[in-house]
Image: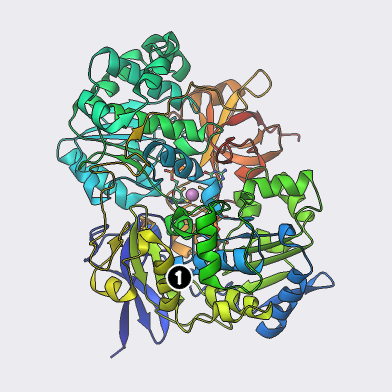
Amino acid sequence: MTDLKFVPTTCPYCGTGCSFNLVVKDGKVVGTAPAQRSPVNEGKLCPKGMYSFEFINSPDRLTQPMIRKNGELVPVSWDEATTYIAENLKKYKPSERCALSSARVSNEENYVMMKFARGVLKTNHLDHCARLCHSSTVAGLAGSFGSGAMTNSITDISESKCIFIIGSNTFEQHPLIGRREVMAKQNGAKYIYADPRRTHTCGPADLFLQFHSGTDVSLLNGMMQIIIKNGWEDKEFIEKRTKGYEDLKNIVMKDEYSVENVAKVTGLDPKDIETAADWIANSGATALIYSMGITQHTVGVDNVHACANIQLLTGNLGKRGAGVNPLRGQNNVQGACDMGALPVSFTGYQKVTDPASHKKFEDAWKFPDGIAPAENGYEVTIMMNVLTDNPGELKAMYIMGENPLLSDPDINHVKEAFENLEFVVVQDIFYTETCEYADVILPAVCFAERDGTQTNTERRVQRWHKAADGPGETMEDWKIISMVAAKMGYADQFAWNDISEIFDEVAELTPQYHGMSYERLSHADALHWPCKTPEDPGTPILHKEKFLTPDGLGVFLPADWQPPAEVPDAEYPLQFTTGRCLFHWHTGTMTRRSATLDSEVPTGWIEINAEDAKEIGIRDGEMVRAITRRDSLTVTARVTSTIKKGTTFMPFHFIECPANLLTHNALDPVCKIPEFKACAMKVEKISKEA
Ligand SMILES: Nc1nc2c(c(=O)[nH]1)N[C@H]1C(S)=C(S)[C@@H](COP(=O)(O)OP(=O)(O)OC[C@H]3O[C@@H](n4cnc5c(=O)[nH]c(N)nc54)[C@H](O)[C@@H]3O)O[C@H]1N2
Ligand SMILES: Nc1nc2c(c(=O)[nH]1)N[C@H]1C(S)=C(S)[C@@H](COP(=O)(O)OP(=O)(O)OC[C@H]3O[C@@H](n4cnc5c(=O)[nH]c(N)nc54)[C@H](O)[C@@H]3O)O[C@H]1N2
Ligand code: SF4
Ligand SMILES: [Mo]
């Protein structure tokens, strides 16, 4: 009889946070099996979760620390690697050091990185991929509601009477939330899908708004004008629970947002805009669901405000089946933000510039020489700009679990930035594109090989359980950082025996997590923050009675529509947008090492509308040249009628045709997110002679 063990954990991919069991045989993870208990996924998984065990035993895993000596990476001991890092990091001033944390590791490990950056490196130049993802949400919803998190829970979506999805390809990117959207539809909900592409998520749609990339504010303002003109607004909700309604009317009632004008800007039929406005306002409970189509723009924060405004206007907040629901991306991106892996806050969004918070952390941590000053640090996108525009200001970077050389916009710019760094540490589970620039590479264990907690998109804090040992000399991320900290002279501040002690420290310092402990999390399946006392059952729905703003009111924050930073013109006539596919994950480090997933989608492509393709003279399957003002690349054309005419799309997973060679580094002025979702492009036929 073979001895099989089943170890419960959560999926290492998306922010849905599905649970399952890892199947362990002879100390090795060999499969996944359903865990029925979690209400999030009720035992079901999408292909990425199902095959998440495949990369774990890949022969490509990093297994030993390495130092670059005379240009060559040489395996060394942990002692040598950490001594070398400490000696080098000590050479630089605090303001010359920066760090990237990771949405792929646990809450505890993000906390340890945050403490390391602020207490050991003494810098606030700390950020992570949330910048590229939902920084618009964090900034935007903090203004509107006082909290940047999803307002309702995943299970709640199935109770909605109207599902309004804008800029989220839920079926491919959050499949087990997509299931809830389908359940709502089966229960009789109306289903509206707004996207430049007819993706799988459009399948059940009663109404498809196929509009131009980058025109979201115009569309939403236009809908709000229709709602107000028809008297469909929720007057009681506006009166009792909001402020700024006059400001909203001053903007959305302008002639610019008449349905005729909005139809022109968005490329939609006026009747469809009216129908959508009617359903959103009058269904009884509308859930607005959004993701990167809204956030990744130079007007990302305006887009998020517009989503909040329409839900405040129609009273679709603080009740079941409604809400503003930003679907968080990586498995633990919510947690990484909660833990303060951001340049502006400690845990629980306690601001670094607030003297009371600064003192609280300084006193609790007891670094003899203090912590980073009470001033905001650089965002990751700003770090890259500082590196290229002001060489010598930043000199050393410590990266845990990110791959900016493939995931940041305008790869040529990123390369230039990394060339200007003197010292780079990369801590990962695989050798990545970013490792090319590393002076030291540190091998970490992966999700299956560690304990910890993670916080999913609905603020649900869940446990991970270690199923197997990591290969070779791999170590837990928190242990690696603690070792480096000790070598730099701060052993006492990182002297935990067990990861649950780190969680206790987090709970002590973080109001939202204050009532949680490993003990409670092992009995309760999970807890939703805020959970303030040991008796507090947690909070699946936010803003029921009042918002988290200082006066408890929701705030209308209207803005005029502005086009993307770069719009199509005679030379670059197409609108280029980027995103993902079901089977691959970001820079592909894990999914491209999973035989099943990789065989489904072996390489990248560019989607191009059939009419555009005809004009250029290209056919489906042909290799074409895609060109922007940054660079160009060759890629297979996928000629289709599912994408809006004038628009092209590429996934960014593939190093052989990296979409980010073409994207640009234009940023939202408030949250500094790049405009991954819109820039100008031309596509050329590759002539036979060339
Ligand atoms: N399979 C898979 N799942 C993932 C990921 C992955 O890499 N692979 N990544 C995870 C992460 S970190 C994230 S952040 C999420 C992202 O999840 P999503 O945001 O759902 O994914 P994207 O493909 O980036 O973009 C969503 C949609 O935005 C549309 N879009 C493009 N431009 C615009 C626009 O201007 N306005 C509007 N309204 N829509 C537009 C695109 O056509 C696309 O269908 O997915 C998570 N889940
Ligand atoms: N063009 C374009 N670009 C985009 C986007 C887009 O829509 N379009 N989306 C952006 C978004 S939303 C995001 S979130 C970013 C994602 O950008 P990244 O975070 O850079 O992408 P990942 O490939 O997820 O990188 C995570 C790294 O962590 C490593 N890793 C996994 N598990 C562990 C672990 O346990 N420990 C350690 N130490 N490392 C681990 C992986 O091997 C991988 O190298 O990409 C952004 N880039
Ligand atoms: S929906 Fe997300 S969390 Fe669930 S199995 Fe798929 S990738 Fe994993
Ligand atoms: Mo993301």
Q: Is residue 214 above or below residue 658?
A: above
| Disc 1 C-beta below 8 A from ligand 2 | yes
Looking at the picture, tell me which residue is in the foreground, 145 or 424: 145
Residue located farthest toward the bottom when viewing the structure as drawn: 1
Side (left or right) of 645 relative to 1: right
The amino acid marked with disc number 1 is Phe
The percent coordinates of residue 24 (x first, y second) are 37, 80
Q: Quadrant of residue 94?
A: bottom right
* Residue 655 can be seen in this image: no
Q: How many marks?
A: 1
Residue situated furthest left in the rendering: 187
**Element at badge 1?**
helix
Residue 313 location (% of width, % of height): 29, 26
Relative to 252, say whether 681 is above or below: below
For mark 1, does the 10 Å Cα neighbourhood hold few (<14), some (14 to 19), or many (20 or more) residues? Answer: many
- Quadrant location of residue 255? top left
* Position above or below: 431 against 242: below
Judge whether 571 appears above or below 169 on screen: above
- Residue 494: horizontal and vertical position, in percent? 55, 78
Rendering coords of residue 641 (x, y %): 44, 28
Which residue has dot 1 on it?
Answer: 447
Screen quadrant of the C terminus? top right
Toward which corner of the image does residue 430 lie, by quadrant? bottom right
Instruction: Please indicate whether residue 502 sits to the left or right of residue 314 in the image.
Output: right
Quadrant that contains the N terminus: bottom left
Please name the residue shown 64% across and 76% down the image. 484
